[in-house]
């Protein structure tokens, strides 16, 4: 199984744990770490919508809490309406691109980003730098 296939499968597993009672839109993310391990995350909504967390943010925060923010090398993302066929690739929102950029700059790498639908469909591959050109991050503050 390719790197992208592994990450999309893990992201689908993570999406099964999404807490999305308000939007009904489940998202899963899976991070490939430099040692080959995979960390996942799912979106977590809140009745106060602004407090909701995206799957990519949850997964990245999990990696950071484990002291592994700089170890992220790739991410897989899936999403779609819960209980429906979701085959259109889902790309990370702007906030998540920025969060992933923090990890990318800390690790001094351009992350591979694999995107697919919740239940199937094609997988698209990008580089984070293509999704967030001219990103602001630790390097702009002299910290990377």
Image (tube, helix red, strand yellow):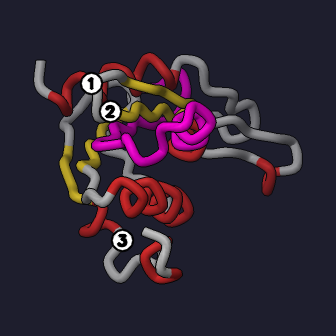
What separation in Å lies between label 1 and label 3 (alpha carbons)?
25 Å
Q: Give the structural element (helix, strand or loop) at label 1.
A: loop
Q: Nearer the viewer, mark 1 or mark 3?
A: 1
Residue at point 45%, 34% (across, down) = 29
- Between 8 and 30, the residue placed more toward the observer is 30
Q: In this view, does 19 lie above or below 92?
A: above
Mark positioned earlier in the residue sequence (3 or 2) = 2
Q: Mark 2 — residue?
A: 32
Residue at point 31%, 20% (across, down) = 9
- Residue 114: within the magenta? no
- Left or right of residue 144, residue 41 in this image: right
Q: Is residue 23 above or below residue 14?
A: below
Q: In which quarter of the image is residue 38?
A: top left
Cβ–Cβ below 8 Å for labels 1 and 2? yes
User: x, y (%) of residue 130?
Assistant: 24, 68
At label 2, counting other C-alpha atoms closer than 10 Å, the crowd grade (few under 14, some 14-19, many 20 or more) is many
Disc number placed over residue 132 in the picture, else none: 3
Q: Give the structural element (helix, strand or loop) at label 3.
A: loop
Q: Nearer the viewer, mark 3 or mark 2?
A: 2
């Amino acid at each position: 199984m390719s790197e992208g296939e592994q990450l999309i499968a893990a992201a689908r597993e993570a999406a099964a744990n999404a807490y999305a009672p308000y939007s009904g839109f489940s998202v899963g993310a899976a991070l490939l770490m430099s040692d080959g391990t995979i960390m996942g995350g799912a979106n977590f909504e809140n009745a106060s919508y602004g407090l909701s967390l995206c799957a990519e943010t949850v997964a990245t925060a999990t990696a950071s809490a484990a002291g592994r923010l700089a170890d992220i090398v790739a991410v897989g993302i899936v999403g779609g309406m819960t209980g429906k066929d979701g085959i259109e690739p889902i790309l990370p929102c702007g906030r998540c691109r920025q969060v992933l950029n923090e990890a990318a700059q800390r690790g001094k790498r351009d992350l591979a980003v694999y995107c697919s639908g919740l239940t199937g469909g094609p997988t698209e591959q990008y580089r984070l730098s293509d999704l967030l050109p001219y990103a602001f991050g630790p390097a702009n503050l002299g910290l990377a």
